[in-house]
Amino acid sequence: MTFEESLHDVTIREQQLETHILRSAEYLKRADQALKRQVSMLYLAIALLLVIQGLFTFHAVGRTPLAGVALISVTSLLAIINCGILIRTKTWLHRLNEAWLAPQEKEAFDALKIQRNELIACKPRSDESKNASLN
């Protein structure tokens, strides 16, 4: 098998393993739990921001210039929008998180990575030998 075919074979096996893991019930359950926890924290951050911003606004209306209160309110609104964007981003997370893998899945992934690295490490040597034979 040529270098390109071997590398392509390893890449296909990595993709198949990743697809299998991403569709497994255990992985989906762990990902769902982690995402729900992160989204809950973002909702909590929004709620706290609204409460603190509301208290500050009511307290500072008479003491702070209107432009300052408006600037702080706009900044808080942007922070809330940022949290909303983060929530949407978290729900679209499709990357494989290796921390959630079972030990045998981690070993299989590591073996494929080692195999890929060995193939890539062998590539320059074969090119150098071709160049040496041409000289």
Image: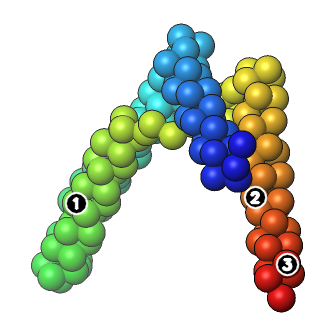
Disc 1 crowd rating (10 Å Cα; few below 14, some 14-19, many 20+) is: some
At 53% from the left and 11% from the top, the residue drawn is: 25
Locate residue 45 relative to residue 105 in the image: left or right: left
Q: Nearer the viewer, residue 66 or 113?
A: 113
Q: Nearer the viewer, residue 18 or 5?
A: 5
Disc 2 crowd rating (10 Å Cα; few below 14, some 14-19, many 20+) is: some
Percent position (x, y) of residue 27? 58, 20
- Which label's residue is closer to the chain start, 2 or 1? 1
Residue denoted by label 1: 77
Badge 2 element? helix
- Looking at the rendering, in which quadrant would you find the N terminus? top right
Residue denoted by label 2: 120
At 22% from the left and 60% from the top, the residue drawn is: 77
Q: CA distance from mark 1 to mark 3?
A: 67 Å
At 56% from the left and 28% from the top, the residue drawn is: 16
Badge 3 element? helix
Q: Nearer the viewer, residue 131 or 105?
A: 131
Residue type at mark 1 is Leu
Percent position (x, y) of residue 37? 50, 30
Residue denoted by label 3: 133
Residue 53 visible somewhere in the drawing: no
- Which label's residue is closer to the chain start, 3 or 2? 2
